[in-house]
Image (cartoon, coloured by chain):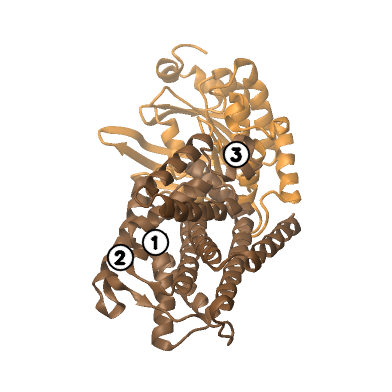
Chain colours: A orange, B brown
Amino acid sequence: MSAGVLEVRDVQKTFGAVTAAKDISVSVPKGAIYSLIGSNGAGKTTFVNMVTGYIKPDSGEINFGSRNIAGLAPRLITRLGIHRSFQIAQLCNELTVEENMLLAGAIHHDERPSFFRHAHSAAARERAMATLERFHIAEHRNRLIPELSGGVKKLLDIAMAMAGETQVMLLDEPTSGVAADEKFPIMDLVIEALRAEGVTVIFVEHDMDIVTRYSERVLAFYDGQIIADDTPDEVLLDEKVQRYVTGGPA
Amino acid sequence: MRYVLFLYAAIAFVVLAAGSIILPDWAMFLFAMALAKGLVCLGIVAMMRGGVVSFGQGLYYCIGAYTATLAANMWGLSDIFLLTLLSSAVCLIVGVIFGPMLATYRGIFFAMLTLALSMVLYGTLSKMSVLGGSDGLNIAPPTFLGWAPEGRDLQTALYIYVVAIVVIAGTLMRIYFDSEQGLITLATRDNELRVEYLGASVRKVMAYNYIFAAVLGGLGGTIAVLALGHVDPEFAFWTTSGEFVFVAILAGYMSVPAVFVAAIILEVVRSFSNLYFPNTWQLSLGIFLLIVIVTLPNGLGSLLSRRKGGKT
């Protein structure tokens, strides 16, 4: 693997008396698949939110390539190639599945979104359908979001995030709210699609089976700090991780 | 798909313009005023698509009307095309100044700030005797590229001009609503977080809609003052803005023709209610709006829209 595409250095974040991130330093190599584990409130989502611009760190650097992106607006970070999905899928409920995908395509189009180019043009619909088919959700294209299952919503959320030139993808609990029998098929689909494009992946996950099966490296969070940073097997055998995260041997 | 839109636009122009042959003067005036106000309401609808409603669109209606009147009275400009261009340009500039500032506000804050701006203008104009104070100003009938019609000819020319402006503006707004930016506007109404995380600026979307609405407001005000021959600060008063919101709600945000249909319905209901129940005509308008809200919560436009369940 090459040098780190995402370098986080000494990042801190407090909310009043609560320290959500304490001297977080991570180097994520290009094309790697990292998972973030930890109990609720450990700092995983804060980490994702800081990298994607939702929260501005109090101090520290988040370097993407040669640029410090700490504190940049989410849309600017997205434009640089760092995309994300959400724990609760963020979709436009009043639009159909296809329109959600058209929206992502319109924003990530080679040219700026146009005031004249039809959003439902044949070319745009073709691109949207290709992505929906790749994620096996094309059959739902004419349905509104509230009519969809949790799994389809998650897939659409990730498919929309991937519409642009993605270099780093952060997935916040990609299998939460998904039926047990859908979890592995969904992760298979997503990871395969991301790997095919050489995208660096960082995903937050509570299910250790998913962590061990899909990630190359695991960052274990506790109380706003990274308490372990290693391969899945090593991290899950770590004494601190067993005590504070998994609650016992995996 | 575009040629179908242009075909509809051409048919709409011919049908509406044909009204000038059969309509009596009073009806032509009523339609011209309704269509002029419909332009202002179309601007509100553009903002509604992004999830905000302006309660102060009288600001641009008034600025457009005063700009045309002052240009006519001070510089002797009488050409309707020049007056329209000038008023639209002034409203564009004012919209560009206020748009980015207001684009960060939502809901009641946006509504109240827009209302406040229009009331500041109302208060200022009412106290400025140089601009006619609360009595306002008169404007001479316009000319059309050097042609100075009178009587029925003037009424007809003005009506056809309004129809042309409405058809052009309506077509352009339909193209915008159907465009990529139009889809981003609809998505913004629904989920701003998603739009920002896809890489688009929600603030810019809001500012664009506000600026378009400002220009449309100016167009409406210019046409109204030319039809009426008089402008006063009431153009910026909150009841005038409320009337525009009334039409926008009646129309819904899905269909462009519905906005002008709603504007015509309001003018017709008001005119006849005023004639037959002079003391209670507002009551009949209120009942009419209630019926529309209960039976068509997404407005008259939901009858014409192809969108699912009339929800979007």
Question: Is residue B8 depicted above or below A186 in this figure?
Answer: below
Q: Nearer the viewer, residue A160 or A250?
A: A160
Which dot marks residue A95? 3
Tell which tag, 3 or 2, sits nearer the viewer.
2
Residue A130, percent from left and from top: 74, 40
Question: The residue tagged with tag 1: helix, strand or loop?
Answer: helix
Q: Are marks 1 and 2 in contact (CB under 8 Å)?
A: yes
Query: Label 3 is found on which chain of the structure?
Result: A
Residue B13, percent from left and from top: 67, 64
Question: Is residue A239 depicted above or below B184 in this figure?
Answer: above
For the N terminus of chain B, give its image quadrant.
bottom right
The residue to which callout 1 is attached is B58
**Residue placed at 59% from the left, 78% from the top?**
B153
**Residue placed at 38% from the left, 42% from the top?**
A10
Q: Are marks 1 and 3 in contact (CB under 8 Å)?
A: no
- The earlier-in-sequence mark between 1 and 2 is 1
Which dot marks residue B122? 2
Q: Nearer the viewer, residue A227 or B99?
A: B99
